[in-house]
Image: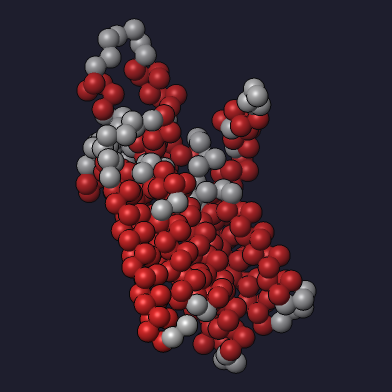
Amino acid sequence: MTKPSKQYFSLRWRFLIIVLLLLGIFFRCFNLNHKIYWHDEVYTSIRSSGYTGDEVIKEVFDGRVIGVEDLQKYQHPNPEKDLGDTINALAKNPEHPPLYYLMARYWRQLFGAAVNHPRGLSVLFSLLVFPAIYWLCLELFESPLVGWVAVALLAVSPFHVLYAQEAREYSLWTLTIILSCASLLRAIRKTKNSRKVTHYLWSWVIYGVTLALSLYTFLFSIFVAIGHVIYVFILERFRLNKTSFAYFIASVAGFLAFSPWLVVVVTNLAIIQHKTHWTTIQVPE
C-alpha cells in the first residue's frame, strides 16, 4: 500500500470513528424526557430525596385520593428531608451504596427534578467513560488507534446507551471501574520505571481513591478488586516487591475508606437478602 493510500485509509477510519462518537453522544441525549420514568428510577428519586419506599407507602396509601402533588414531594429534595435523611434512607437499603444517590440529590437541587434532569447526570458519567476507556487502552496497548476504536464501539453500544439514559448508578459504576483499572496499570508502570517512592506515590493514591469510589458506587466492585489482586500477584509472580507492596497498601486504604459502608452492609445482611430475594426467582422458560 502506497503512502497516500495509507493516509487515505487512516483518514477514512478517523472519519468513521468521529461519526460513531457523534452518534453515541446523540443517542445518549435524545428523547431523555419522553422515556417512561420506570420503577427503579422512581426509587432513585425517593431515596436521594431522603425517603424510603416503606415510608412513602405508609404516608400515601391511607385511603385518600392521591393527587400528583401528593407524590411529587417524594420525587425531589425538599425542606422536610436533609442530607442525613438521605443517608439514613440508603442505610435501610444497603445493597445500594450512597455515592450516586448523594450526587443525584445535589444534582437535582441544582438543575431541578424534571425527568430529563436526573437522567442528565447518568449521561454525563457515560460521556466521561469515553476518555476513561481511551486512557485504559493506552495503558494496555500503548496504541491511540486501539483507544479510539474502543471509544467508537462503546459509543454506539446499545447496552451503554440504555444505561446512560437511566437515573441509576450504572454509568457511574462503569466509569469508576475503568478509572480504577487504568490507574492501577499506570501505578504499576510508574513503580517499575521509578526508583524514588515520590515518583509513583500519587499514582497509587489515585488508584486507592478510584477503588473506594467504585466500591461506594456498587457492591459488585468487590469482584473487580479481587480481579486486581489476581492480576497483580500473577504479574509479580507472587513475590513481595515494591510493586506488590504498594498495591497492597493502596488497596487496603481503598477498603478502609469504604469500611463505614461495609459495616452498614455487614450489620444489615438480612435486609439485603430480603431486598434482593427476587434475584433468586427462576424465570419460566
- Is residue 9 placed above or below 71 in the rendered structure? below
On the picture, is 256 further left or further right than 24?
A: right
Q: Residue at x 28, y 45 (%)?
A: 30
Q: Residue at the far right: name it.
A: 238
Residue 278 found in image quarter: top right
Q: Nearer the viewer, residue 203 or 14?
A: 14
> Is any atom of residue 148 visible in this view?
yes
Q: Residue at the far bottom: name it.
A: 195
> Is any atom of residue 271 visible in this view?
no
- Is residue 1 placed above or below 210 in the rendered structure? below
Q: Nearer the viewer, residue 28 or 71?
A: 28
> Number of callouts in the render?
0
Looking at the picture, how far across and down is residue 58, in whole percent? 40, 18
Looking at the picture, how far across and down is residue 9, in whole percent? 40, 75
Q: Residue at x 44, y 46 (%)?
A: 158
Residue 8 found in image quarter: bottom left
Colour scheme in use? secondary structure
On the picture, is 267 further left or further right than 62?
A: right
